[in-house]
């Protein structure tokens, strides 16, 4: 493996990857995770999704709670 983007974990269907936040959980993280789990089950785009190829946010998934 040469980089994080090459990790086979990104394609593993039985793994849900989430960021590590040292020093505590960011404000609003509980709500974001809960909302994203609902969106995942409903087949809707996830909020704050990061694409490993770019290392940045996915523009298509940067929607609001209403999308």
Image: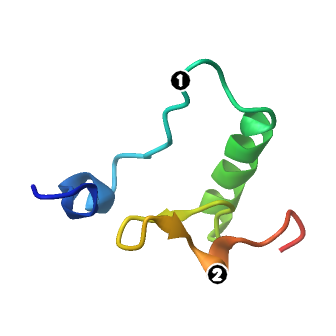
The reply to whether residue 44 is in sight is no
Q: Earlier in the sequence, mark 2 or mark 1?
A: 1
The x and y percentages for residue 3 are 20, 57
In the rendered image, which quarter is residue 55 located in?
bottom left
Where 14 sits versus 60, above or below? above
Q: Residues within 10 Å of mark 1 (few under 14, many from 20)?
A: few
The reply to whether residue 3 is in sight is yes
Q: Residue furthest top?
A: 23
SS state under label 1: loop
The x and y percentages for residue 31 are 79, 40
In the rendered image, which quarter is residue 67 located in?
bottom right
- For the N terminus, the quadrant is bottom left
The x and y percentages for residue 28 are 80, 37
Give the residue drawn at x 71%, y 32%.
Answer: 26
SS state under label 2: helix
Query: Which label belongs to residue 43?
Result: none
The residue under label 1 is 22
Q: Between residues 4 and 30, which one lies in front from this camera angle?
A: 4
* Whole-number angstrom distance, CA of label 2 to CA of label 1: 28 Å
The residue under label 2 is 60
Give the residue drawn at x 49%, y 33%.
Answer: 20
Is 54 placed left or right of 23 in the picture? left
Question: Contact, CB < 8 Å: mark 2 with mark 1?
Answer: no
The x and y percentages for residue 57 are 58, 68
């Amino acid at each position: 493996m040469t980089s994080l983007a090459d990790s086979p974990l990104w394609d593993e269907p039985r793994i849900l990857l989430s960021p590590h936040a040292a020093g505590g959980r960011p404000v609003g993280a509980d709500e974001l995770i809960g909302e994203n789990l609902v969106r995942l089950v409903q087949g809707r785009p996830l909020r704050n999704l990061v694409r490993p190829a770019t290392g940045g946010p996915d523009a298509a998934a940067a929607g609001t709670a209403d999308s």
